[in-house]
Amino acid sequence: MLVGLDRADDAGVYKISDDLALIQTVDFFTPIVDDPYRFGQIAAANALSDVYAMGGVPKTAMNLIAFPAKELPISVLRTIIEGGLDKMREAGVVLVGGHSIEDPELKYGLSVTGFIHPDRVLTKRNLKMGDRLILTKPLGTGIISTAIKGGMASKEITEKVTQTMATLNRVAAEVMRDFPVHACTDATGFGFLGHLAEMVLGSGYGVRIQASNVPVFSEAIEYASMGLVPAGAYRNREFRLAMIDFAQKVERTLQDVLFDPQTSGGLLISVSAERAEDLVEALKARGVEVAAVVGEVIGEPKERILVE
Ligand code: CO
Ligand code: CO
Ligand code: CO
């Protein structure tokens, strides 16, 4: 066992031989968009992401389905699975099975198995002094989903955020393989700052974040100022606020976006300072357009996050 429950990471890692380790992860949730095909794509992209966050390559997957068969036509389920399969194909992943149950609440996701070289496993906490932190997708999907549910979001931003959540972290993971990356995770339910806190705790270092450099959907700021902030963002804030210092200029609406629970968010990468800009350029060249350096690893204060 290379990565297990004792130090919860994005996925478990089990060494098979000197040059092969298995990565295993599972993730499923209730619909966050109305379109069943898109929901299938997003749920699959989200489940596959934890393999990418470990630096690995996903290989096989199994469907996990809870479906209200008495209330919804079976064609809805077929469309969800088709959306999931679309993302598995794009990831080069083979669907090898699955399990479905009848449930009053629809849920879909995947159990995923991937491969990695045992020496190349990227955990969350291996930050190095002076590293730069890079984020590869904009924040605000939870706030915008709240606005969508409330009927407040435009068609345009609904499409944009859906597209972002359905985008695999595959390209970002492939690109970072050629760089001196020391640690990685993906921004999901705990929000950007919550996942950053997990990287910082036990690392022996602190981080400084340049809030204005963090990629965010401008609509998320707008909706947050209207109070459309999901309960999860408040929970994330309450949980981690004690280890975060916000500069005066970082407004509450932006803080809310930094704590916003993400679905299928981007990778959060810690890379050697001297190659950080090259990595951002390489990501952009491969179509990861919003990738940006958002902060750096500092010696003091230890295990704290400064947001400036
Ligand atoms: Co993760
Ligand atoms: Co995870
Ligand atoms: Co996960």
Image (spheres, rainbow, N blue to C red):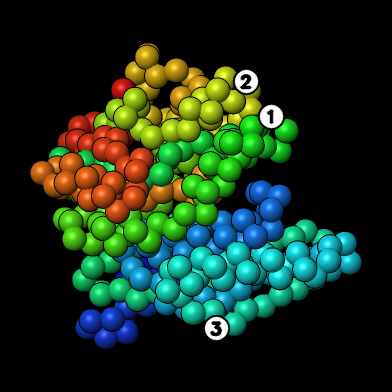
The one of 236 and 86 positioned closer to us in this rendering: 86
Q: Residue at x 37, y 14 (%)?
A: 249
Snapshot quadrant of residue 206: top left
Please provide percent x and percent y for residue 69.
Answer: 84, 68
Callout 1: SS: loop
The one of 166 and 301 positioned closer to us in this rendering: 166
Instruction: Examine the rendered structure and indicate whether residue 210 appears above or below residue 175.
Output: above
Which residue was labeled with disc 2? 226
Q: Which residue is drawn at 61% across and 40% down?
A: 158
Mark 2 vs 3, N-terminal side: 3
Q: Which residue is drawn at 22% across and 45% down?
A: 281
Q: Residue at x 63, y 56 (%)?
A: 39
Callout 2: SS: loop
Q: How many labels does the image show?
A: 3
- What amino acid is at disc 1? Met
Q: Do the residues labelled 2 and 1 touch (CB within 8 Å)?
A: yes
Q: How far apart are the two marked residues, 3 and 1, measured between alpha carbons?
A: 40 Å
Outermost top residue: 248
Q: How far apart are the two marked residues, 2 and 1, measured between alpha carbons?
A: 10 Å
Which residue was labeled with disc 3? 96
Please provide percent x and percent y for residue 72.
Answer: 84, 63
Q: How far apart are the two marked residues, 2 and 3, measured between alpha carbons?
A: 45 Å
